[in-house]
Every structure is written in structure tokens, then in C-alpha cells.
Amino acid sequence: QSALTQPPSASGSPGQSVTISCTGTSSDVGSYTYVSWYQQHPGKAPKLIIFGVSQRPSGVPDRFSGSRSGNTASLTVSGLQAEDEADYYCSSYAGNDNFVFGTGTKVTVL
Amino acid sequence: QVQLVQSGAEVTKPGSSVRVSCQASGDTFNSYTITWVRQAPGQGLEWMGRVIPIFNITNYAPKFQGRVTFSADRSTSTSFMELTRLRSEDTAVYYCAREDDRRLQAFDYWGPGTPVTVSS
């Protein structure tokens, strides 16, 4: 089971937007709505920010949004804030009772 | 409030085994799946597998099949992850998380993580 592909890094100035891609295959991202995104600050456990491709749990700011096109899911963070600086991971169901995570993207707020 | 409380850090030798526990609050054990994820130093998240306590069903990632065992004790709402034949590459933080089918199998609550160090 190969990890989903994410860019290693992304950056933006405060107030700008940044979009992170998560590329899989027709056997995972492209086939299921079980795509989620997680934010992880250094030394902390991951936190769920998007589930079901584009849904936000309560308490997650609407600056975070998710989408999918074909085998690629995307996370957009609008109106970047200093506290958005973190690592972001996508995850997808991959069939046969298995899940897979993305390689992770470090977001820097300039 | 959902809480997942994990056991403390472990230091162990190559070839040995380690057992990490994850105790859940609320009705987690009766209604949800517990997933195990690990993160090696400076690396990304890696899905290891999961256990459905109410049915005692387990699923394992192919990479760990045969070397990891998940179990669940419903009387104490505790899940266990045992990893055997440890090698240095197993040095990582091991997380348990709740998988919620109402949130399309997302991992919505996480434990704080248990650092495991494998060193001779």
C-alpha cells in the first residue's frame, strides 16, 4: 500500500490562501468519499479538520475547505493565520479494510 | 468529552515485543472502532490497523501483518497494540484514535501518543 503523494512544503503570507494536493489512485482517493485531512503541530497528536472529502467537524474554522477531482483531493486554507503553521496529512480508505495516509505537507506562514 | 489515555513511554531492545494500551472514555468502546497509527521521528503518519471492540474484529495493514496484534477489553474500555520482533525502525510514537463511521470513517479523537524506542 503506497502512501498518497503530497508536496513536502507550502507557504503563504498571513491573509493569503494555500492549497495542498493529495494524489492517490482510482483504488483509494478516486473511489471513496472516506477522505480526511489532519493538522499536526510539533509534538502534538493530529487533529481532524476535514472528513468525507469536504465536511468540517464542528469547531473547525470555515477557512479550511476540502475538495476532490478525480484521484486528487485538495485542502485549501484561506486567510492564513500564524496558528495554521503545521504539518497537514490527508488520509483515504483504500479498500480491503485498509487506510492510507499522505506523505505530509509542512505549511509555513511567512 | 471523549478522551483516549495511552500508556507511558517504552524503551526496549531489538527482537523483543512491546505492548501499548489505550483507554477510552464514554461509549467509545460500544460504538466505535479504534485505529492505531505510528509516526517515526521526523516522518509521516502510518496506518497500522484497527480493532472493532464490540465485534472483536481486527484489520491489519499488510506491512504489519503477522507482527502486530490488536485486542480490546470491553470491561475496562481498553485497547491494546502488541508489536513483536522489534527492530530499530520501529522506533516511533504510537497513537490510538477513534474511527467514527458517522464522520465517514475519519479519525476524530486521538490519544496523546506513546513513544517507543528500540535500541540495543
Image: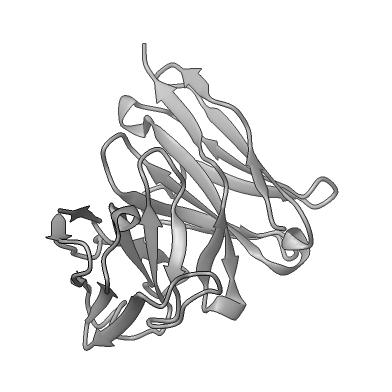
Q: Of A65 and B6, which appears nearest the observer?
A: A65
Outermost residue toward the right?
Answer: B75
**Residue at image point 78% right, 62% down:** B27
**Residue at image point 29% right, 54% down:** A82
Q: List x then y, in percent, for residue B33.
A: 63, 63
**Residue at image point 46% right, 28% down:** B116
**Residue at image point 31% right, 31% down:** B89
The answer to whether residue A72 is above or below residue B58 is: below
Q: In the figure, is residue A71 to the left or right of B14?
A: left
The answer to whether residue B96 is above or below residue A74 is: above
The answer to whether residue B117 is above or below residue A20 is: above
Q: In the figure, is residue A99 to the left or right of A11?
A: right
Q: Of A76 and A54, which appears nearest the observer?
A: A76
Coloring scheme of the render? one colour
Q: In the figure, is residue A65 to the left or right of B94?
A: left
Q: Quadrant of the N terminus of chain A?
A: bottom left
